[in-house]
Image (tube, rainbow, N blue to C red):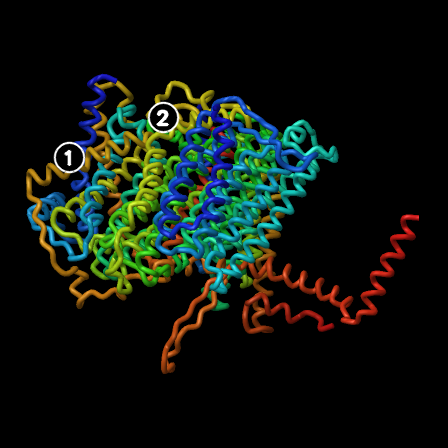
Amino acid sequence: MSFPLSHQVINLMACLLLLIAFAMLAQRRILRLIYLFALQGLVLSINTAVVALATHQPHLYFSAGLTLALKVVALPWLLHRLIDRLNIRWDVETLLNIPTTMLVGIALVIIAFNLAVPISQLAGTITRSSLGIAMASVLLSFLMMITRRKAVPQVIGFLAMENGLFFAATSATYGMPMVVELGIALDVLVGSFIFGIFFFQIRETFDSLDIHHLEKLKEKA
Amino acid sequence: MSSFDVVLAVPLCWIAVGLFGLSSRASRAQHARIFFPLGALGGLLLMAAAYPALSGEPHSLVLPLGLPDLRFHVRLDSLAAFFLVLLGAVSAGVSLYSAGYFDKGGGGQIRLVCFQYHVFLASMALVLLADDAYLFMVAWETMALASYFLVTTDHDIAQIRSAGLLYLIVAHIGATVILLCFGILQLGEWSYTFDAMRHNTLAAGWASAAFLLALFGFGAKAGFLPVHVWLPEAHPAAPSPISALMSGVMLKSAVYGLLRVTFDLLHLQLWWWGVVALSLGLLSALFGALFAAVQTDMKRLLAYSSIENLGIILAGVGLTVLFHSYDMNALAALALAATLYHCLNHALFKSLLFIVTGSVMHATGHRSLGKLGGLIRFMPRVAAAGLVGTLAIAGLPPLNGFASEWMLLQAFLLSPSLPNSYLSMLVPVATAALALAVAMAGYVMVKFYGVVFLGLPREELARAHDPDPWEQAGLLWLALWCVVLGLAPMALISATDPIASALVGAAIRDSVQGSSWLFLTAIRPERASYSALLLLAGIVLTVAMTFLLVRRLYHGRVRRSAPWDCGFAPLDARMQDTAEGFGQPIKQIFEPFFKLERSQPSPFDARPLYRSRIEDRIWYWLYVPVMRAVEWLSSLIGILHHGRIHLYLIYSFATLLVLLLLIQ
Amino acid sequence: MNAGFFVSQLLQTVLAVSLAPLMLGWVNQCRAWLQNRTGAGVLQPYRLIIKLFHKDAVLAHNASWLFRFAPYTVFGCMVLAVSIVPILATDLPLSPVADLIALVGLFALARVFMALAAMDVGTAFGSLGARREMLVASLAEPALLMVFFTPALISQSTALTTIVETLAHRELTLYPSLAFAAVAFVMVLLAENARIPVDNPSTHLELTMIHEALLLEYSARHLALLEWAHALKLMTYTSIGIALFLPWGIAPAGQWAMMPLSVLAFLVKLLLAGAALALLEAVSAKMRIFRVPEFLGMAFLLAVLGMLTRLLLGSAG
């Protein structure tokens, strides 16, 4: 059984996405996280373009272009400016140490793959087998959000989760209607602005972006 | 006299030898050299008689012993025969060794030791032969008691006494749980024979309860996590031949019990039993390997290594159950064969290593790794036997440890064909845990052999010398079997075929076609094949050719001088690694697993001292709370004690009144 | 099994054993060019080995028979290993002797003998080298096993012959699972063969030694054999990698006409592999010893990911 080149490229992009999700879990430096996020956006746009080529759906080209503009250029630049002004470079130790995080990550991948097996048999697209990988990267980004102590990596995890969802949408239904897509893109952009404002506020109040300071807001019974 | 009669006669002969030894008035030397070789002879007979029974039909007998209504039933089938061969082979070697060991004054009263030793051997044989729960429990308890007395041979040392007490307590908890398991299996019909239990069909819930109880109960004897705490205390406390027998044979009798209950007495196996056994086994294997890497006492290191190998065996059992529950019988047969093979191999190389430590302890008087070293020059024969044992336990080709681990890994590699998609992804990842445990075992054994036999002596050891011929005979016997079983695995696999057919319904021979006696294959020759004999031949040929070529073309001149050591000052024994030093990377990398107490010197100390203690977390998580709960419960009962006689009389009177009223 | 098979087996063994120092020399030469040096020439390892054979062996007073015997054992294991891996043709007489797992065991045997021999003389360097070598090995073996899982899953076998025959007969497709496994294999290769970033093969500082510390007490023919065995190990690992991930060009069983072509293909692949290895070494820095577990953990992770993607994507991955 031989597969067309486009199918192989899509599978390869899916695996790269998973790899980048794991790399983000293991990364300690925030600048590298941003570069990985940009790389993830690039992988996503290439994937969308290849799907567009293989299935002859021109609106996916727009989608790919939008992803490129937003996730590879605009958002990373925004985040870079943010961390420059906040003057943070490193992250402190994560909640769990890195080997344990990796093991939990592998368990999540196995769960995601197993969940995807019956679902992918229902979908009718050529990329249905990569649905499991997309779910896995969503779960891994969620894990990244949970195990980080500073605010900026958590936000990057949130954005990476959105990347994974976008990939899942592309692989299951050949992308979303343009309106939905523009709406989501706008949401993400506005959300990032709000995050930026919150960062400054948190920093003003606690003089640090370490999240556990937020626990001081607890009511003393 | 059929082989069944011989097999039955051997335990009785052992008891007879023990009784004679108890009552004899001979001197120590005569005692050791007469009775223990007789025991060795018994072992040989057992091995020879049980081997044909591997492929024959099961024989049973009802003995005229026991209580009037509860007679002893015995049965010899292929599974029992396999473990009897194991018992015979190991006990032959260890008894030969003991003839020399106890002669030298290792262990107290020789008459008592001789009696307890042979009763221990006989009770293990009876456990394997038992066909009803009554004889099984009687023999099991006798085994536990005999080994307790043997462990506490040097009972004037307080540490040995407390180790023995811990062993006794855990053994009895295990025995109680096994009794409960048999209670479930007999399903309220008041019939205690295994035959009746085989014909009972249990509901899934009761069967699961029986399996879990069997796992816990037999695990308490085999040293599975978390009921392993007695092993690292009891094995070092006992004299070396006893440690060898306990680690080599007694732990395997627990595996035999588990196999008997799971595959023979229970009709069905559920897949999650396999998962439980597999995960518990892999955890034990990792635990044992990690803790062995940081030990400083020879025998404690070997005890933890036993925990590791029993974990590997349990993982194999779990895999067999898993495959069998999905009716993949050919794969189950492969996993079962690998497990049984590993049982035999571990029995041989672990006993070999324990008696090597016995010789070392006798020759040097030390058992701490911090006081040994360089013994390869003073005790070359013990060192050679130790090398064979080390290479075998580290799982290196062409010896026996590698062959069984190879088969087990091949069985694991087949697990992606499991129908359950979660399992087909999880079990291959779990293989990595097995590989890690096996690789750690290599680390541990390099540490053991290197620190004991290589390098420079860390204390004054020049008086060490090779032991007497009896000890050497025992060492040679076991080492030889390690090599033979490594080079000819196919013979063993064919021998275990009937067991696989009986227990899981398929034989390895069904799935191996067209391969000769030279190659060990899994499923098909094109899938995987390994030939230890050809490997050894290849290495020997290449080594010989290289040696000859180098000598012909160049020369073989040698000069002796001081060690190079990068030009540093004269070499001192303290410059090489200590046992703690060799285990330091493991301590650092796997720190969360250990409970580490360390006191480090400060620059301002007048006499700087470094102390480090590694303890088992499970003791503090599981045992200490349970002990505290038991203590608290007992203290509640203490309320009833006042010391006033009137109150005690009132208790008896009240009980009497209540009973009279009840009977009415 | 006619005489042709035995001749090709002999040819493979002799070719591999004689070319191994050349490969090491080529890697060192590439590294020299990348570092803007002239380098010692690709034949330097041969000159070293011949020089060492001429010398008298100097042994420590307390060196035992294990110390003298270990170099021969290690060399023998490596020669056997390189004869088993299908380099020029599949289905050679020695191929059923060991499958992938048994090859790993063979390497482990050689390594244990070297570690024990290092501990034999009782120097600080020897114990240090033995301890570090066994540490790296015990972490690399699970990763290596996981790497081998993926091709074994694809070809339903762990025998290298079967794997080569299965993989070489497929069309050129991108298998992401094999790509992951290949990256993980390269990482394990660097760790096991004492290359940068795990170990520096040309160091003289004990802080940075792993493999070098095991060789420190050896001289003359023993050292020559050990250096040769080291080169053979690198060649064997590279050949395993080529057989698993780039198997095209290996002559199928019995087709002798393809042999010259397969020799040529092998040489070209070795050339490229050596240059790639030199490039990897030139751009990496040596890691601290306690970062090596993380490195190997990452290799393990990649290998597991490869296997899981294979299980998920089925025959498309």
State the CA–CA distance, disc 1 to disc 2: 31 Å
User: Can residue A25 be seen?
Assistant: no
Foreground: B601 or A141? B601
| Circle 2: element type | helix
**Mark 2 residue type:** Thr
Above or below for C69 versus C37: above
Where residue C240 appears, as percent x and y from the top left, is 30, 35
The residue pinned by badge 2 equals: C162
Q: Nearer the viewer, mark 1 or mark 2?
A: 1
Above or below for A68 versus A145: above
Residue at x 51%, y 42% (from the top left corner) = A64
Residue at x 63%, y 43% (from the top left corner) = B178
Residue at x 39%, y 72% (from the top left corner) = B610
Q: Which mark is residue B193?
A: none
User: Can residue B12 be seen?
Assistant: yes
For residue C95, which quarter of the picture? top left
The residue pinned by badge 1 equals: B545
Q: Chain of mark 1?
A: B
Quick one: quadrant of the N terminus of chain A? top left
Pick out the residue farthest to the front: B25
Where residue B361 appears, as percent x and y from the top left, is 35, 56
**Mark 1 residue type:** Met
Q: Residues within 10 Å of mark 2 (few under 14, many from 20)?
A: many
Foreground: B559 or C89? B559
Above or below for B62 versus B182: above
